[in-house]
Image (cartoon, helix red, strand yellow):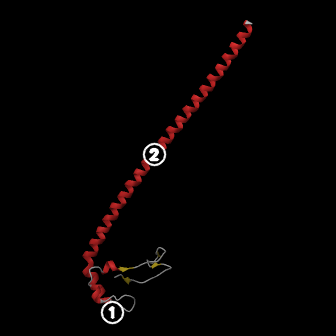
Amino acid sequence: MSEWFDGVAEWFDGVAEWFDGVAEWFDGVAEWFDDVAEWFDGVAEWFDGVAEWFDGVAESFYHVSESFYHVSEWFRDVNKPLINSFLLQILPEQSLHGPHLTKKAAFSDDLLLNVAEPTGLEPATSNVTGWRSNQLNYGSVLVP
């Protein structure tokens, strides 16, 4: 009977060894998942850095755009008398089309803001001579 107990004990030792192997395997799997999670943390950190970089670029573009706006505003104010005198030379007493754009309107402070050149729904394109072209062409209009 002692041999039988020895066999059962040996069998339990084998089962315990098997469970130790399974536990070791699960430890390896858990370690692998930790490595994968660490890698994803690194990727997320990298994307955070990229997002920060894009925020910086967007802020820079905003400041450049704001500067161009102020320069264009300054340019308009500085050149308003020159442009108004040019408009006085080329405009008739009263325009023939659309809203009335008269010589009197040329002296308006907001004339340069009120004349628009829409290109329609498609962007304007240039050819080699510098002419602007678009499938949809409209003339200037005076916006009240």
Q: Position of residue 128 (x, y in %)?
A: 47, 76
Q: Position of residue 22 (x, y in %)?
A: 63, 26
The image shows residue 46, relative to residue 86, as above or below, that is above
Q: Does residue 50 appear left or right of residue 15 in this picture?
A: left
Q: Which residue is mark 2?
A: 46
Q: Position of residue 113 (x, y in %)?
A: 32, 77
**Precedes in sequence: disc 1 or disc 2:** 2
SS state under label 1: loop
The crowd level at tag 2 (other Cα within 10 Å; few <14, some 14-19, many 20+) is few
Q: Which residue is mark 1?
A: 94
Residue lying at the far front of the rendered structure: 1
The image shows residue 61, relative to residue 14, as above or below, that is below
Residue, x 38% and y 56% (percent of image)? 57
The image shows residue 12, relative to residue 27, as above or below, that is above
Q: Nearer the viewer, residue 24 or 128?
A: 24
Residue 127 appears in view: no
Q: Amino acid at mark 2?
A: Trp
Residue, x 48% and y 78% (percent of image)? 134
SS state under label 2: helix
Q: Quadrant of residue 75?
A: bottom left
